[in-house]
Amino acid sequence: MLFDYCIAKQTRKTGMTLRWLIAAILLMPLAGYGNDEEDLKAAVIARCMYDAAEFGEELIRTCVESDLAAAKALEQYPASTKEIVSRCTRNRQNYGWSMVKVCVDMDIAAETALAAYDAKLAPLIDECRAKAAKLGPANIKGCVDRSIEMK
């Protein structure tokens, strides 16, 4: 009874309708028995509801759609980006697949930019790699760019 009261109060407070809550509750048990796509969808719905419920149904729907699209796009990335995708997934998955994709895209762009830098900057790039290697190419590029600006 208290649970029902709290849910109803939260539903009124946030503007989230009860049907979203019921849908999430019904989908959660299926997550352990479904295929990867169903598991992904259930996890995305749960995360989006948790993160965006206070902003209403439309934001939840947008969150789910963008996260599912980002997850599908990441599956299409070439094998050469596997290390970047893995690192970004480890570091950003709690924020959703859209953030993982942003991380991957930024790191790929940064790798391309670092490769195009003048060979004279190689020692600086190596120094920044030593400092920020675990943080990825975007952070390495940021280190290099800041060092160049300071000179």
Image (tube, rainbow, N blue to C red):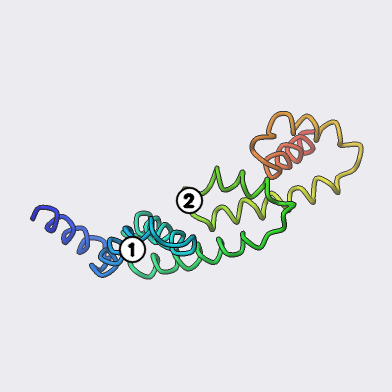
Q: Are marks 2 and 1 in contact (CB under 8 Å)?
A: no
In the rendered image, the residue lying farthest to the right is 119
Q: Image quarter for residue 9?
A: bottom left
Q: Which residue is mark 1?
A: 27
Residue at the image position 61 percent from the left and 64 percent from the top: 73
Q: Is residue 75 left or right of residue 145?
A: left
Nearer to me, 21 or 12? 21
Residue at position x 50%, y 62% in the image: 67
Q: Nearer the viewer, mark 2 or mark 1?
A: 1
**14 versus 140 height, above or below:** below
Relative to 42, 19 lies left or right: left
Q: Secondary structure at mark 1?
A: helix
Q: Amino acid at mark 1?
A: Leu
**Which kind of residue does numbered mark 2 sit on?**
Tyr
Residue 95 is marked as: 2
Q: Quadrant of residue 52?
A: bottom left
Which comes sooner in the sequence, label 2 or label 1? 1
Query: How far across and how far down the image is residue 104, in percent?
Result: 64, 52
Q: Residue at x 39, y 59 (%)?
A: 33
Q: Taking 139 as reference, is 25 above or below it?
A: below
Packing grade of label 1 (10 A; few <14, some 14-19, many >=20) is some
Q: Give residue 62's quadrant in the image.
A: bottom left
